[in-house]
Image (cartoon, rainbow, N blue to C red):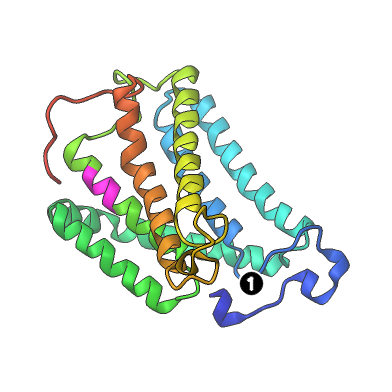
Amino acid sequence: MKAVFRQPRPFHLERSLGLVYESGFGIPSGHAQTALCFWIVVAAWLSGLVEKAGKKRLIWAGAILLVLLIGFSRLYLGLHFPTDILAGWAVGGILFLVWFVFSPALIRLFSSAGLRLQNICAAAIVLVMNGLYPADRSLPALFLGFCIGYAIMKSRFPFEARLDGKMPDFRVMFVRCLTGFLGMAIIFIGSRLILPGEGSLFSGLYYWSTGSPFYELGQFARFGLIGLWASAGAPRIFQQMGLADNPEGEGTEQ
């Protein structure tokens, strides 16, 4: 949508308005859209783990406050106009509406499709994403890695956020976060040192330099591995570390 509307950011019109600078166009605000989609989902999940109404209201209030503050921060930094923020929230709201209308049917369809067909569908969606917007390789790769990892996790070692049927305590949640981010950092930095492009240990080689014809392929592999780690690698490590219930057997294919 940014590429279609091509609306400039505030600092494009007046340089002094920009406290920080980003490439690309302004509308819609991706941060506003992502904040709405992410924090509302997190609030819905967390509120389902607690029983007291007061805690539920506190969770929802915190999520809404975060969405508003993230939107305001984009205005303050001179990265977006108010219309960009409103458009980002509108896109996020439409995505929510579409999901809540069609999700029951989609869940039943994909749950009965089997692991192979689920991964084929994910790959087909990624092909469409790359075709519609070839300038970005990171998001399609994250999507593909996350989908493949999630399908493998659900069929081989089903992961539940609860531990022993209860919400984990702070220590467990902290170690999970630390482990997850540490693994992601290792994948990101390690792949950057190995794969073609800037920062590679083999950048002196012709096909491994910044202008390598394999650079975009390396980017795709890097972000695909991060998505795979988030949905399958980290949950499996949590189970092996005793940070999550470890079901016996390989689970039922879904």
Is residue 159 left or right of 131 when viewed as pictured? left
Q: Is residue 52 above or below residue 198?
A: above
What residue did someone put label 1 on? 24
The residue that appears at 78% across and 56% down in the rendered structure is 76
In percent of the image, x 42 and y 61: which residue is there? 218
Q: Is residue 69 magenta?
A: no
Viewer-proximal residue among 70 and 125: 125
Name the one closer to the observer, 122 or 138.
138
101 on left or right of 111: right
Q: Amino acid at mark 1?
A: Gly
> How far across and how far down the image is residue 133, in percent?
46, 76
Furthest toward the front, the residue is 205
Q: Which residues are magenta?
A: 148-152
Residue 96: name its quadrant: bottom left
Mark 1: secondary structure: loop
x and y percentages locating residue 162 in the rendered image: 34, 26
Is 123 left, or right, of 250 in this rendering? right
Foreground residue, 116 or 161? 116
Residue drawn 55% across the image and 81% down it: 4
In the displayed structure, does residue 80 sit left or right of residue 165?
A: right
Residue at 88%, 66% (x, y): give it: 16
Quarter of image, res 48: top left
Mark 1 neighbour density, 10 Å: few (under 14) some (14–19) many (20 or more): few
Q: Does 111 appear above or below 81?
A: above
Position of 208 relative to 1 (above/below): above
